[in-house]
Amino acid sequence: MTVRPYMNDFELVTRLDISRCAFFFDVDGTLAEIQPRPELVFIPESTLDALQRLQDRGGVVAVISGRKLDDLDRLLDPLRLPAAGVHGAERRDAEGRETRLVEDPATLARIGAELEEACAPYPELRVENKGVAFALHYREAPERESIARYLAESFAERYADLLGLQPGKCVFELKPKGASKGEVINSFMREAPFAGRLPLFIGDDLTDEAGFAAVNALQGLSLKVGSGPTTARQRLASVSAVADWLRTLLASTGGMSPIQEEQRGGIS
């Protein structure tokens, strides 16, 4: 399917009924600008406010990320949303129940130690241990991409019964088999309060393609942030365009008028 151009005129806004939608968002590169190091990432307060108001209007909201759940809660504070971390290896449903794809802790500890040792000759590379997965970052050393790819592929092959390889933006992730943003969106959509709603997923990366495919299969709306090949059916140009789109959606559909929204302090 041909992906439409960037939605600079936000033409979908007037056709959405927030109260009948299930909104799924990636975080890094979607709700938050990508930073040189993961710990520097933040979600703007105005975007957090927009997520809250989506819920106030009757929408349901979840985040689907490669980050751990506790990291997502830190970024989203004071919100506590249904969420999936580590690409679906961790999930918290709308009732607060948490589930995890669990592997043997001793095996994961051994893999982590081996990966750290393999990366030791390349201090520019950064290994992030997520407990149930590992991310090999090279954002601060893009010239090391080929080395990072080789190391990640070799570990994925060595532990093929446990781990799958997921490339991303300046990162290669080794995640548990069965962890997929598409699968976790399907899981949410089988449960209240998501079931029966129109799913909408916004993401920016290769890691989000499975989510786009799942939403497309459910006849929902898939939006990719930025350029590049994708199965998403629409695009937004940037993180700031996502924020603008949310503000326009809130101001243009049911509830407050744009003037009322501005008086509340949400539009700048």
Image (cartoon, rainbow, N blue to C red):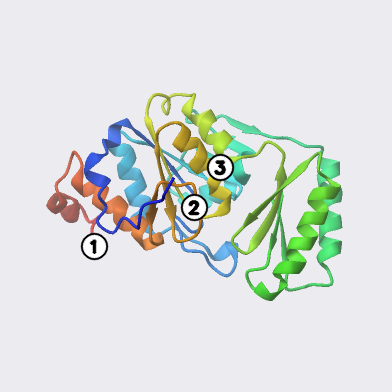
Q: Nearer the viewer, mark 2 or mark 3?
A: 3
Return the residue at label 3: 210
Measure the C-alpha gap from mark 2 to mark 3.
16 Å
73 sits to left or right of 3? right
> Quick check: 80 above or below 219?
below
Q: 10 Å neighbourhood of mark 3: few (<14), some, or many (≥20)? A: some
In the image, what residue type sits under mark 1?
Ser
Of 95 and 160, nearer the camera is: 160
Marks 2 and 1 in Cβ contact (< 8 Å) = no
Q: How far across and down, in percent of the image, does residue 202 sit?
A: 43, 48
* Callout 3 touching callout 1 (CB < 8 Å): no
Mark 2 neighbour class, 10 Å CA radius: few under 14, some 14 to 19, many 20 or more: many
Q: Residue at 54% of width from left, 65% of height from top? A: 40
Residue 118, image x, y percentages: 85, 63
Which of pointers 2 and 1 indicates the residue nearer the eye?
Answer: 2
At horizontal 27% and vertical 39% (from top left) the residue drawn is 16
**Residue placed at 57% from the left, 53% from the top?**
206
Q: Quadrant of the C terminus?
A: bottom left
N-terminal of the two: label 2 or label 3?
2
Q: Which quadrant is home to the N terminus? A: top left
Which label belongs to residue 27?
A: 2
First-in-chain label (2 vs 1) = 2
Secondary structure beneath label 3: helix
Residue for badge 1: 268
Q: In the image, 202: left or right of 267?
A: right
Q: Tag 1 or tag 3, which sits nearer the N-term? A: 3
Looking at numbered disc 3 in the image, what kind of residue is underneath it? Ala
> Around disc 1, counting alpha carbons within 10 Å, would you say few (fewer than 14), some (14 to 19), or many (20 or more)?
few
Res. 177 image quadrant:
top right
Q: Is residue 7 above or below residue 184?
A: below
- Amino acid type, label 2: Val
